[in-house]
Each structure stands twice: as structure tokens, then as C-alpha cells.
Amino acid sequence: MAVTRLGRNPMYQQIADTLRAQIADGTLAPDAKLPTEAELRAEYGVSRETVRRALGLLLNEGLIVSARPQGHFVRRRRPMVFRPQAEFRERPYTPEMDAFMTEFSEEGREPRQEIAVAIEESPPDIAARLHLKAGQLAAVRRRIRYLDGEPFNINDSYFPLDLVRDSEIMRPESITRGANAVLGELGYQQLRALDELHVRMPTPEEARRLDLGPGTPVACHVATGYTAAGQPVRVAVSVLPGDRHIVSYERIRDDENGEA
Amino acid sequence: MAVTRLGRNPMYQQIADTLRAQIADGTLAPDAKLPTEAELRAEYGVSRETVRRALGLLLNEGLIVSARPQGHFVRRRRPMVFRPQAEFRERPYTPEMDAFMTEFSEEGREPRQEIAVAIEESPPDIAARLHLKAGQLAAVRRRIRYLDGEPFNINDSYFPLDLVRDSEIMRPESITRGANAVLGELGYQQLRALDELHVRMPTPEEARRLDLGPGTPVACHVATGYTAAGQPVRVAVSVLPGDRHIVSYERIRDDENGEA
């Protein structure tokens, strides 16, 4: 006869379940302080170890943050909208996206970026997307973007070195009109792009550069840009912490009006 | 004088770093067996506890899986492509997406889905997207999709109950021509959609339903569909485990050819 599991979940899971439900329904609002360890011990009649395991679960799920010695707090998410379609059209296509962008507007927050430029053999997956042969080098513009002094995301753009060798793209400075405009002036205007989104835990290096707390996964957005002839001329890799971004797209049915 | 941190990272982190690098560069390929705990202890001259902490890091990053009693293995990712634009146009717009879809084709894998239909007050964020007032109910079609018997993703679609009450959408069965076609026949064809992607750790309920291992974040894809008049008629929430999906979009520069 098969042994069936009887009874309820372990106590630390039950405590975590209760707190998680309170966070989900807003009883514990963003930035609210959780009961102290002593209060939780008294309320549930459990050991310090049990309380710590419960809080550890919620930390790993990214629902709370620990701020010693004050205690634990409900994590506030203050996402910015990452809209890849802005690359080819700054203004939204639809009234719905217009409203959405207004709701999540970054007005009043101070943007800043750090830029470094390197020449290197790109990783195999990037080289494949750029159709680079062995030994062909890429120019890489690595950016960390900050909002109000906090690191927000990483954006690394790879270009075939042969195309951009003598251009502004090689200078570690902001390009006001954008690297894509420079590519266009060089005769490599991008007409199409393929976007891929992967979701994963950050590497320790990313966690350090982006100052990520426990339980913070990232979206890795890889955009490959193509000329009219189908030549890949740029791969932009953005690493977007889950607690700081919403990636958003708009779609329009094309059999009605010719748009995508 | 400021105290500066001297020396290297703790030993368990160094071991994890070495193994992570070997996974990244393919020295340890997908499905490869890692050295045993005893082998790692001997190689680095460390305690069992140190080896376990190193492996624990990689487990939490989703890079390896534990299969007792055989040991630890490099996680194999076998992603499927989730292409939201297929909703409005099955065939890709660009040759690049055509090639990409072929590369990640699910040919030969057996799809199956479980469907349940419910009538409920929807959560506040869904009600807001559907412009539902207090007390207005939604019809929900909840699906779990399987590939080769493994749970792959969750898709919950919400409709204002008043619109779909007497339609096939209320039946817990597959709709071959799609729920969107049914909406169209009812006079609510969707012409536009706004997609939002959030990245987070799964809830314990999601982890259970989707059989997620440690260190597996999810993308939560929320698509709101609108009629020509701007009436929201559907919200589809997909929960996509990071180890099983790539979300992909294609973009076309619109000032050249009128497409999005």
C-alpha cells in the first residue's frame, strides 16, 4: 500500500503562507514593517529557528527585504517600463500604450549612465547572431543605467568591428541621436529586429553590479537588428532586474490595417 | 582610515565560481554529471559543509539539478518559443523570425492541456484592466499546458462575464478556432493588445503546479486585448517558467513600410 502524506505543511511554511497572503491582499502594504521575530514566535508559539525559516522563504521569493537592525519590510516595487518598440518608433502606436506609459512615467527621476567601450571576440551566442567568423572582432558598448543614483539595468551592445571602426560608436560617451542613427549614417540602417527574452537568476557579477537583493531574478532581453538585406548589424543585450522593470509591447491586428 | 576588504572570496564561492565557469564555457555540458561531493572535497581540500554550500549556490541559481542518489547534473534547458504576436498573425512577419521558429520548433513533442472554467470576482489588477466595476464578474478559463507529459506553463484568460455568458468560452474544452475567434463572432473582435512582462520568483502554488526546481524564476506575461472602440475584452495571464521558455517578438521599422 502506498504511503500517503498526511497532515498540514510544516509550521514555517504555514507562517510564510499567512504573511504571503497578507502581502498579496495588501494587509501588509509595500514598505510596511513585518511583525518582529519575537512577535511571530509569540503569535505562533514556535522557535526562533522556525520564524527565521519562514522569513527566509519570503526573502528568497523576493517578497520582503531585511534591514537590520530595524527588521523586515514588504518590498516596494517601483518598476520602469522597458518598451523595445521605442527603438523604431518613439511614440506609442495605440491609445492603450499611451495611457500605460503615462501611468509608469519616470518623470522627476534622474537618469545617468556609465559607458565603457571594448574591442573583443564576442561570446559564441553573440558571434552567431552577428554572423561573425572565427577571429572577427566585435565592438562592445557596455552601459550601466542609473535612476536617482540606483543601478537600474545593464545594456551591452555588440557591433561587427569592421562596420563601426571609425565611428562615434567607439567613443565611451553618450550618443545623443543614438547608436542606431550612427549605424544608419554608415549605411547599415536597421529595418527589422528579433527580440528574445530569457528569464533566469542573475550571475553573482550581475547581482553585484546591479545591487540585487535575494530572490531577484532578471529578464535578459536580446535584440538583434537587421538591415533590409538581412545583415545583422547590432545585438543589444539588456539585463533587467525583475523588481525594477516591466517589459511592454503593443500589438495591432494586421489583417485590418496593415500594421504589425 | 577606511577598512578595505582584503583577500579572496570564501572557499565555497570560489568552488561555485569554478563550476559556474565550466558550465558557461561548456566544459560541463548540459546533462553532464558534476564531480561527486567526495571528489570536490578531495580536489579543494575542504569540508563536506563547504562543498554543499557551493552546490547550494548553483542549485539556487538554477544552473544544476540534484538527482539523489546519483548526484548533481548540469541543467538542460529545452526552451519553447512563446510568440505573443502569433495571436494576431500566425505566420511570422520577418525571415529572421521564420528561421528562429524553425530552430526552436516543437516538432515531435506531444502537447496536451487541462482546462477549467470558473466564474468569479477577478483580482483587483485584472478587474482594473477589464474596466470591471465592483460586483461585475469575470469568466476565467484556466489552462495548464503540457509537452510530452511535463507541465510547461499556466495560462489563465479572463473575460467580462456579460460578454461571454452564453458562448463556448464557458465550456471546459479546447476551442479549436481559439477563444479570440469566439469573441469576434460575439461582436468583440480584438484589434489591439497591450503586453506586460513581469519577472519574479514563483509562488509555492505555481512551483507545485509547474513542478519547478529551485532557482527557477517565472515570466508573467499579461496581455490585454481591446476592440476597435478601446473596450478591453480579454486579459490573458501566462506564467512561463524561465527554464522552459523564450519569449520572442519581431519588430519592423514603421516609417519605411507602414508596419509596426
Image (cartoon, coloured by chain):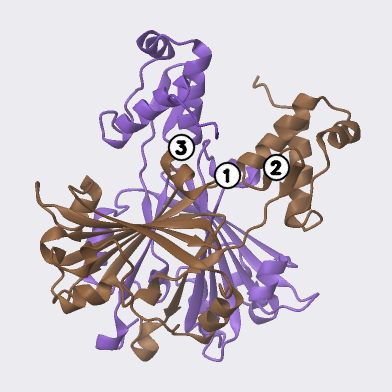
Chain colours: A brown, B purple
Residue tagged 2: A67
Mark 3 nearby-residue class (10 Å; few <14, some 14–19, many ≥20): many
Real-space Cα distance between discs 3 and 1?
16 Å
The secondary element bearing badge 3 is classed as loop
**Tag 2: residue type?**
Ala
**Tag 3: residue type?**
Gly
Q: Taking A70 as reference, is A75 left or right?
A: left
Residue B66 position, x and y percent, is 47, 25
**Tag 1: residue type?**
Gly
Instruction: Report the residue that reaches farthest toward the front.
Output: B1
In the rendered view, would you say A98 is above or below B98? below
Q: In which quarter of the image is residue B105?
A: bottom left
Residue tagged 3: B62
CB-based contact (under 8 Å), mark 2 and mark 1: no
Of B136 and B199, which appears nearest the observer? B199
> Could you tell me which quadrant the C terminus of chain A lies in?
bottom left
Of B1 and A119, which appears nearest the observer? B1
The secondary element bearing badge 1 is classed as loop
Give the residue displayed 23% in from the left and 46% down from the top: A123
Q: Residues at marks 3 and 1, common chain?
A: no
Residue tagged 1: A213
Residue A187 position, x and y percent, is 13, 77
